[in-house]
Amino acid sequence: MTDQDPSVRGRFGAAAGTYDEHAAVQAGAAGRLLELIGRIPGPPPDRILEAGCGTGLLTALLAGRFPAAAILAIDLSSRMVAEA
């Protein structure tokens, strides 16, 4: 895969290093999602699957909120996972 790869995977991979600098909307959505997750009744989860983890912004928030949970974070782009 090169930075010229026109696929979704390639485009996200090429942007992995600077993605968070331009992801204000995603950061707001991650904070809101964490807030909503906190309202779910019952015990905290012991396992979390995050599909589409990107650079790991929500992953880090989830780890902070649920420190005992095992988190499996996956993404289409291996470069995004490396950033996470």
Image: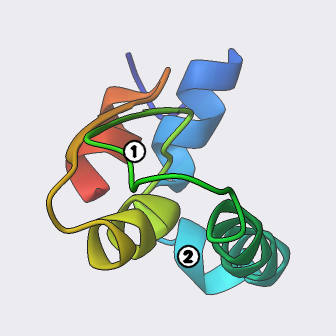
Element assignment for label 2:
helix
Please report the residue visible at 68 percent of the width from the left and 57 percent of the height from the top.
40
**Residue 84 picture quarter:** bottom left
Left or right, 69 with respect to 7, comes to: left
Which residue matches tag 2?
Answer: 20
Measured from the top left, where is residue 64 in percent x and y?
Answer: 30, 78
Q: Position of residue 65 (x, y in %)?
A: 38, 76
Q: Toward the viewer: 40 or 55?
A: 40
- Whether residue 6 is visible, yes or no, is no
Nearer the N terminus, badge 2 or badge 1?
Answer: 2
Residue 32 drawn above or below residue 12: below
Residue under the image location 59 percent in, 39 percent down: 12
Q: Is residue 11 left or right of residue 29?
A: left
Q: Residue at x 72, y 69 (%)?
A: 39
Amino acid marked by disc 1: Met
Q: Residues within 10 Å of mark 2 (few under 14, many from 20)?
A: some
Is 9 or 75 nearer to us in this picture? 75
- The residue identified by callout 1 is 80
Query: Residue lying furthest front in this view?
Result: 42
Q: CB under 8 Å between callouts 2 and 1? A: no
